[in-house]
């Protein structure tokens, strides 16, 4: 699946660069172009991809200070300039635009939904957002920002691929170490997903090819989507890998998703990666059928992706997912953080209706 990436905000820029690097290093060719947009000039300096500073007249290159309403206003005002910069990267081969943003920061959480809305107004190809939720220990303002942004961007994007910072972070790591690992995990998983729809990305052709249309159809229900991943050692004999494929798929869905405890979904896609001679068609079909039973979806697609590895990897994409306990817990934290912020300012708590955050705009 050929995509153009645009990172919004500090986290969005870093993840976008890491994803572009992974695609290049692996030789997949799925990423057709990448750029980063921010209101903070300092956050753009260390990036090796194309960059654009916005909001210079408003914030003088110093960022929005966690104010996602200001971040949304700046992006709305300068969306035309941002899209002009993106147009040079949007070849006729591009099949989707993917906005990457941390939903806790001011520029990312405010700018991502505003940019998604404008891109959808202009372009016919899907506009997806990869949204990263702040971890529990990242501060109240980040929780409050992400709650409003999540609700808004889920409406504005064709699909919101959600990633919980707490899901792919190892316990005991420093925050800086944790972010580095999370960025690597995001790059690997998204990179494999995009590449799996590119049959020209590898020399060998899969027996059952996953093409771009299957990724797009899996994300077609809109709303929220999640991505699961797991890998295991594989035998050289495909017949001995039936259990390896099914157990790896279970781990990908039950313990390796980008938002834990998300199972029910409208659609699903299973990609089994590894050396073709190690991939059992029987195992893939069993694993695909198990995902149907587990998710309650009758629209679970499946295929394999040739990869030069002695391991078997399972990538599970779920579209139109139901809100899980983890998401409900996060929204409750966001509500409490917003109420606390309003208490400190002496403002009325009018931002919630039926225990939900108002849209950002």
Image (cartoon, grey):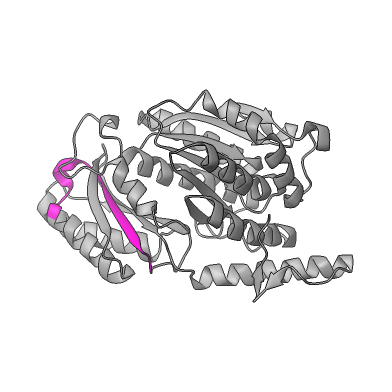
Residue 348 visible: yes
Name the residue at the top extreme.
88
Position above or below: 38 against 301: above
Question: From this viewpoint, which residue is outermost toward the right?
Answer: 346
Instruction: Identify which residue, 322 or 204, lies in the foreground.
Output: 322
Q: Is residue 335 magenta?
A: no
Along the viewing direction, whichever of 177 and 190 lies nearer the viewer: 190
Where residue 102 sits in the image (x, y, percent)?
61, 49
Image quadrant in which the C terminus is located: bottom right
Q: Position of residue 148 (x, y in %)?
A: 66, 60
Q: Which residues are magenta?
A: 264-281
Q: State the residue at coordinates (65%, 60%).
A: 359
Against 297, is 92 above or below? above
Return the x and y of residue 5 as percentages of the image width and height. Answer: 50, 36
Which residue is nearer to you in this view: 72 or 138? Answer: 72
Indicate left or right for 68 with 211 as reference: right
Front residue of 357/312: it is: 357
227 lies left or right of 134: left
Would you say residue 48 is visible in this rendering? no
Q: Which of the 4 quarters of the picture holds residue 135?
A: bottom right
């Amino acid at each position: 699946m050929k995509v153009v990436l645009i990172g919004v905000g500090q986290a969005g820029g870093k993840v976008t660069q890491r994803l572009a690097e992974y695609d290049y290093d692996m030789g997949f060719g799925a990423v057709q172009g990448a750029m980063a947009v921010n209101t903070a000039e300092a956050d753009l300096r260390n990036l090796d991809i194309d960059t654009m500073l916005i909001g210079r007249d408003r914030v003088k290159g110093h960022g929005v200070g966690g104010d996602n309403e200001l971040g949304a206003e700046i992006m709305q005002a300068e969306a035309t300039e941002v899209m002009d910069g993106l147009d040079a990267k949007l070849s006729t081969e591009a099949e989707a635009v993917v906005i990457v943003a941390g939903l806790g920061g001011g520029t990312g959480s405010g700018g991502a939904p505003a940019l998604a809305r404008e891109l959808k107004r202009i372009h016919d190809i899907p506009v997806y957002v990869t949204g990263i939720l702040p971890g529990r220990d990242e501060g109240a303002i980040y929780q409050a920002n992400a709650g409003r942004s999540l609700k808004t961007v889920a409406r504005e994007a064709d699909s919101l691929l959600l990633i919980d910072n707490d899901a792919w972070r190892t316990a005991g790591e420093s925050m800086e170490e944790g972010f580095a690992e999370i960025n690597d995990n995001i790059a690997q998983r998204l990179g494999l997903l995009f590449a799996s729809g590119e049959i020209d990305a590898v020399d060998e052709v899969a027996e059952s090819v996953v093409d771009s249309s299957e990724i797009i159809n899996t994300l077609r229900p809109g709303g929220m989507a999640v991505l699961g991943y797991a890998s295991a050692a594989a035998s050289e004999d495909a017949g001995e890998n039936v259990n390896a494929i099914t157990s790896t798929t279970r781990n990908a869905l039950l313990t390796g998703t980008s938002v834990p405890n998300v199972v029910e979904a409208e659609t699903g896609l299973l990609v089994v990666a590894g050396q073709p001679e190690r991939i059992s068609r029987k195992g893939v079909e069993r694993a695909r059928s198990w995902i149907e039973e587990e998710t309650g979806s009758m629209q679970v697609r499946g295929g394999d992706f040739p990869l030069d590895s002695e391991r078997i990897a399972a990538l599970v994409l779920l579209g139109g997912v139901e809100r899980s306990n983890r998401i409900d817990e996060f929204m409750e934290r966001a509500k409490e953080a917003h109420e606390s912020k309003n208490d400190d300012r002496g403002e009325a708590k009018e931002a919630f209706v039926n225990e939900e955050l108002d849209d950002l705009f």
